[in-house]
Image (cartoon, rainbow, N blue to C red):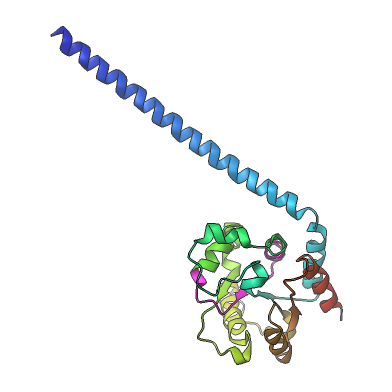
Amino acid sequence: MAGARHRKKWREAVKFLLSIGCITITVVIVVFTKTQAFYDHHVLEKKQGGFKSQCTAAVRMMVKSNIHLLAIDFDMTILNIHTGGEWEGGAEKLQKHVRNEFKCLIQTSLERGIFVAVASFSKQEELILSVLKEFIPEHHYSRVSVKGGNNYPESTGKKRQMQLALEDFSKMSNDKAFVPNDAILLIDDDLYNVEQCAYEGHRCIHFDPEKRAHFVFEQIIAALQS
């Protein structure tokens, strides 16, 4: 009888210790996750520190020039690699290839009320959106559009993607007002897409992935001043 009571107390003690251990592990995981998020944000701010003022100046120029839609190519522009529309490593790994300069540009543009669209030929639209959500605050999700896929004729550049993004912009903002062609700015590493963009009367910037990415801010200011 005494042995049974002893075993019962022993089991209760083990359960208690296990419950304490689970709570401790949970607390450690939560603290680690929040600490990691704070560290990642701090590192990003530090990396952006060298070009933050340039980024802010470029977006200020966009606002002054009445840019309503900023359309940006994905592969070799936002990203420093080309996925070929066949990335299999998930959004978390892919977002490590996002250029910090474009993180800053996208974030600051959204903060200043500019609608942002990714205009791509990649069919992995959901993946691209997930990558953007890795660094865009949730309250800005409604001002972001991703238009990809290989169903668009490449002969017209990114024309169709930008048209569809404008439709999203009208729906999300409940603004049916006409958006003039020169209120759209495209940044793309493909010169042909840039030429087609200019043909449509949009503002266009040819991004050279071989140069340092922060030059894009100077390009924006120069293009909008001309």
Could you tell me which residue is drawn at 63 percent across and 87 percent down? 157
In this rendering, would 205 be left or right of 176? right
- The correct choice, above or below, for 74 with respect to 107 in the image is below
In this rendering, would 76 be left or right of 223? left
Residue 165 x %, y % = 59, 78
Could you tell me which residue is drawn at 75 percent across and 82 percent down? 203
Quadrant the C terminus occupies: bottom right
Q: Residue furthest left?
A: 1
Residue 125 x %, y % = 51, 72
Quadrant the N terminus occupies: top left
**Residue 116 among those drawn in magenta:** yes
Residue 169 visible in the picture = yes
- The correct choice, above or below, for 2 with respect to 212 in the image is above
Could you tell me which residue is drawn at 69 percent across and 65 percent down? 102
Q: Quadrant of residue 184?
A: bottom right
Q: Residue furthest top?
A: 2
Please state the total of marks drawn on the protein image.
0
**Residue 150 among those drawn in magenta:** no
Residue 116 visible in the picture = no
- In this rendered view, identify the residue nearer to me: 15 or 172: 15
In this rendering, would 185 be left or right of 172? right
Q: Quadrant of residue 69?
A: bottom right
Write down the region rendered in magenta: 105-126
Residue 112 x %, y % = 72, 64
Could you tell me which residue is drawn at 42 percent across and 30 percent down? 23
Residue 57 x %, y % = 82, 64
